[in-house]
Image (tube, rainbow, N blue to C red):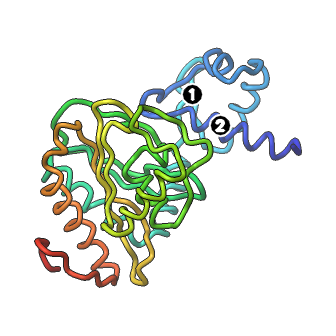
Amino acid sequence: MPRTLATVEHAVHLLELFDADHTEWNLSSLSRHVGKPTSTVHEQLTTLCESGLLTRAGRGRYRLGWRLLKLASALYGSLPWYAPAHAAMERLARRTHLLAFLCVLDGSRVLCVARSVQGRDGPPVAGELDFELPAHATASGKLLLALAGRPLPSPAVAFTDRTVTTAAGWSTESTRIRQSAHAVTANEWASGTGSLAVPVRGEDGVVLAALGISLPTPRLRESDTLLRALHDAADEVSWQLGYRTPTRAGSSEN
């Protein structure tokens, strides 16, 4: 690998280590975590600080820098669907009292680009803070893969005995998802956690994102009611974006 590319990849990896659970890192902890000499990591951290992507937060400690907000604003501004979808996600969370989220397909990865910050009521569920989700074990991942006509990821890790890990199983599952326009998981990523997801579409019908909720599996008894809420929220956004979806039985017209 060319040295410049390797340097960029190492810098990106360092940035990705900062999340809701690790808002600050010190040099020695980062060095141990990535398995590299402190001198190497210090050089990378210094470069990231000089670029504004990181900032020093006291002696030997680092936080994400303000420049990332500028980049995030530019990204969100380039996505006309993000603002209405985000608002619908928050309304859905308040309506269902569950953790709601938006996910996108980025190449072969499923990324959670937004989570609700209000309305949530109940015990924790798997993956609450994860940015990249297992595509074959989450409702959003399965929905996005199926609607894009993608195969099962290889290797397909078996998180539980309910995880879909075979091509035959995925063929059946993806066909059902395309026919129903929603995806469901129950104890497939972690025991006790389930999820539901539906698509948000643009004017030409292309799938832009998955709108979903995570919930304790006992609440899947309410799946019919929750799916109506999900479809209504996603359809409202899709309508604003110019997509005209056929009316489903039992759902409200936009």
Q: Which residue: 48% across, 53% down?
A: 170
Q: Which residue: 51% across, 63% down?
A: 74
In the displayed structure, 88 sits above or below 64; it is below
Left or right of 183 in this view: 174: right
The amino acid marked with disc number 1 is Tyr
Name the residue beneath numbered marker 1. 62
Left or right of 118 in this view: 252: left
Between residue 209 and residue 136, name the one nearer to us.
136
Image coordinates for residue 130, horizontal then vertical, percent: 44, 38
CA gap between label 1 and label 2 equals 15 Å
Closer to the eye: label 1 or 2: 2
Secondary structure category for the residue under label 2: helix
The amino acid marked with disc number 2 is His
Image coordinates for residue 108, horizontal then vertical, percent: 59, 54
Left or right of 167 in this view: 176: left
Q: Which residue: 37% across, 51% down?
A: 139
In the displayed structure, 121 sits above or below 200; it is above
Instruction: Report the residue that reaches farthest toward the front.
Output: 168
Q: Residues within 10 Å of mark 2 (few under 14, many from 20)?
A: few
Image coordinates for residue 83, horizontal then vertical, percent: 34, 65
Which label sits on residue 154? none
Secondary structure category for the residue under label 1: strand
Number of numbered discs overlaid on the protein picture: 2
Q: Earlier in the sequence, mark 1 or mark 2?
A: 2
Occupied quadrant, residue 3: top right
Occupied quadrant, residue 204: bottom left
Name the residue beneath numbered marker 2. 13
Image quarter where the C terminus lies is bottom left
Image coordinates for residue 167, horizontal then vertical, percent: 54, 52
Instruction: Report the residue that reaches farthest toward the right.
Output: 2
Between residue 140 and residue 171, name the one nearer to us.
171
Q: Residues within 10 Å of mark 1 (few under 14, many from 20)?
A: many
